[in-house]
Image: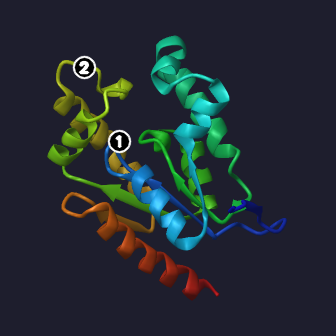
């Protein structure tokens, strides 16, 4: 079983990998496989929130609104500070708060997974549990979210990967190679 370890006191952890991007870009599926390949612990901030709240994300949005969810998201992210040996999949809007962006940058190596709007819409349509997509025009909502977040994703990452035409396996293979290279150069 993989365990998460704390970084030495006073030393920033550069041994985590975190992924940001829009819903449907593959952060959780790809992150799990990367963690398996690198023998690291997989963490999904949305799963941390659900576990702590004892409710689904849709239920949190329904009872606490987006503001309540974002507060829980910030707390989940803060709980990861000072750790190492993890692959972290984040929620799509985690970059909206400046304090979250600072925390992300302190966690380790950042990857922004992108995909075309059409590909994202297709993937999102397979999961009806997306509160921010419960709208009359999902395409318009998705484009608006993406426009609001693109610069923020760019701010926190070292690498951008378009997953539109890649399988999970292809993406994982390429990212494992890049991550290994990145950390080998840090030694």
Q: Disc 1 to disc 2, how far (Cα)?
A: 15 Å
Query: Alpha-carbon neighbours of circle 1 within 10 Å: few (<14), some, or many (≥20)?
Result: many
- Seen at 45% across and 74% down, the residue is 176
Q: Are marks 1 and 2 in contact (CB under 8 Å)?
A: no
Q: Disc 1 on helix, strand or loop?
A: loop
Mark closer to the chain start, 1 or 2: 1
| Residue 4 position in % (x across, y down) | 72, 60
Q: Which residue is mark 2?
A: 135
Residue at the far front in the pictured view: 1
Q: Disc 2 on helix, strand or loop?
A: loop
| Residue 59 position in % (x across, y down) | 49, 17
Can residue 156 be seen by looking at this rendering?
no
Q: In terms of image quadrants, where is residue 50? A: top right
- The foreground one among 60 and 29 is 29
Is the residue 174 above or below the residue 152 in the image? below
Q: Is residue 49 left or right of residue 24?
A: right
Can residue 160 be seen by looking at this rendering?
yes
Is the residue 135 above or below the residue 167 in the image? above
Residue at the far top in the pictured view: 63
* Colour convention: rainbow
Q: Which residue is mark 1?
A: 23
Is the residue 118 above or below the residue 71 in the image? below
Q: In terms of image quadrants, where is residue 70? A: top right
- Seen at 33% across and 67% down, the residue is 169
| Residue 80 position in % (x across, y down) | 68, 50
Position of the C terminus, as image quadrant, is bottom right
- Seen at 49% across and 84% down, the residue is 181
| Residue 61 position in % (x across, y down) | 48, 19
């Amino acid at each position: 079983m993989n365990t998460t370890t704390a970084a030495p006191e006073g030393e920033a952890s550069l041994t985590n990998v975190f992924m940001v991007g829009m819903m449907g870009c593959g952060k959780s599926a790809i992150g799990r496989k990367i963690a398996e390949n690198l023998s690291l612990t997989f963490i999904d901030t949305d799963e941390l929130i659900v576990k702590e709240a004892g409710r689904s994300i849709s239920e949190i949005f329904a009872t606490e609104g987006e503001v309540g969810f974002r507060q829980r998201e910030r707390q989940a992210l803060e709980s990861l500070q000072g750790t190492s040996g993890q692959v972290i999949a984040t929620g799509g809007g985690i970059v909206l708060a400046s304090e979250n962006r600072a925390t992300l940058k302190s966690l380790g190596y950042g990857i922004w997974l992108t995909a075309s709007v059409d590909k994202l819409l297709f993937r999102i349509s397979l999961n009806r549990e997306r509160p921010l997509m419960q709208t009359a025009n999902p395409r318009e909502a998705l484009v608006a979210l993406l426009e609001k977040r693109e610069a923020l994703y760019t701010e926190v990452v070292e690498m951008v990967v378009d997953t539109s035409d890649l399988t999970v396996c292809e993406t994982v293979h390429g990212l494992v190679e890049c991550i290994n290279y990145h950390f080998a150069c840090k030694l």
